[in-house]
Amino acid sequence: MDWQKGRPSDNVEEGSSNDQGGGGGFPGGGKGLGLGGIIVLLVLSLIFKRDLVTPFMSDGGGTGQGQTSVATAQPDRAIDCHNPGDKQVDFVCRVFGDTEDTWGPIFSGANRSYALPKLHLFRGQVGTACGAASTAVGPFYCPGDQKVYLDLSFFQELQDRFNAAGDFARAYVIAHEVGHHVQKLLGVFDQVEQARRRGARMEGADGLSVRQELQADCFAGVWANHSQQRLQWLQSGDVESALNAASKIGDDSLQQQAQGRVVPDSFTHGTSAQRVKWFRTGFDGGDIQRCDTFSGTP
């Protein structure tokens, strides 16, 4: 992937709360991610061999109160993406900038305005408008402050633990989280929350969490299609690396690795095959209208 062709974003910031203590729980009880709450924490605890449930529960039900001081202790600092001084940061800046260049025109073409999100780089733990989170939960999006949160160490884990190497695999991760921002702007988060309050099932192979995550995969594919048309920056094997990453972080693959068995009732992101299918759907068509994962079988 010739990622240097991407335009550096002006909306990347950093802040570290590695030494602030506290935290470790999912933001907003997992709500900020559109995931399955405590069940997700249990699965992640198995995967990362860390107790992510206790800190969450000690926070009074995951409201984020009492831990948000982590964010105020370390003021955010804007990164000069035109002179980042670090190759990984330069990569993130340019991929994130290209998501802006892709989604802006798509929204404009539908007579809508694309409110630019921010990407926040952190180390260890971080406070967000959705609550506190740690590196262990991986990259995530918080609709409360419309920011993508990323600890760069995840890229190394993606390669070492999940055997998903390649620049485009990393770009897919960023694009997936930006896909959640697109959902926020389109009202998907609000609709899912309303359905949850009415008693709709969130977890499970057919749950709303899976459908929401698969749509973000599809939106990542839409971005990849449009960016390739504009920049011609993908090289042989790049798409395959993204599809490989999508398959390696499917619920079934993660559960099999963590506990030696698959439990569909606790799915939150979709199977490896589903994640590949929906990324491919977005990439092949480049049409956001094809990303309706909420109708029929996901």
Image: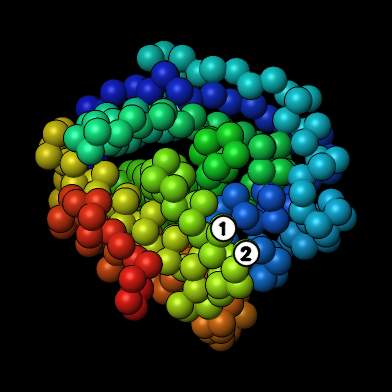
Instruction: Residue at 55%, 31% (x, y): give it.
Output: 120
| Outermost front residue | 198
Instruction: Write down the quadrant of residue 66 in the picture.
Output: top right
Q: For the residues marked 1 and 2, what is the alpha-carbon distance in whole angstroms?
A: 6 Å
User: Number of marks in the image?
Assistant: 2
Vertical position of residue 244 compared to residue 286: above or below:
below
x and y percent of residue 168 in the render? 30, 47
Q: Is residue 275 visible?
A: no
Mark 1 element type: helix
Q: Quadrant of the N terminus?
A: top left
x and y percent of residue 275 in the render? 36, 66
Instruction: Write down the quadrant of residue 34 in the picture.
Output: bottom right
The numbered disc on residue 45 is none
Instruction: Residue at 46%, 44% (x, y): give it.
Output: 184
Mark 2, Cα crowd under 10 Å, few <14 / some 14-19 / many 20+, is: few
Mark 2 element type: helix
Look at label 2 and name its amino acid: Arg
Q: Is residue 207 visible?
A: yes
Q: Is 180 left, or right, of 149 in this rendering?
A: left
Q: Is 295 left, or right, of 13 in this rendering?
A: left
Instruction: Write down the quadrant of residue 282 in the picture.
Output: bottom left
x and y percent of residue 71 in the render? 73, 30
Contact check, label 1 and label 2, Cβ < 8 Å: yes
Instruction: Residue at 54%, 47% (x, y): give it.
Output: 140
x and y percent of residue 128 in the render? 66, 37
Look at label 1 and name its amino acid: Glu
The numbered disc on residue 193 is 1
The numbered disc on residue 197 is 2
Q: Is 86 left, or right, of 199 in this rendering?
A: left
Instruction: Residue at 48%, 25% (x, y): give it.
Output: 12
Q: Quadrant of the C terminus?
A: bottom left
Vertical position of residue 229 compared to residue 77: above or below:
below
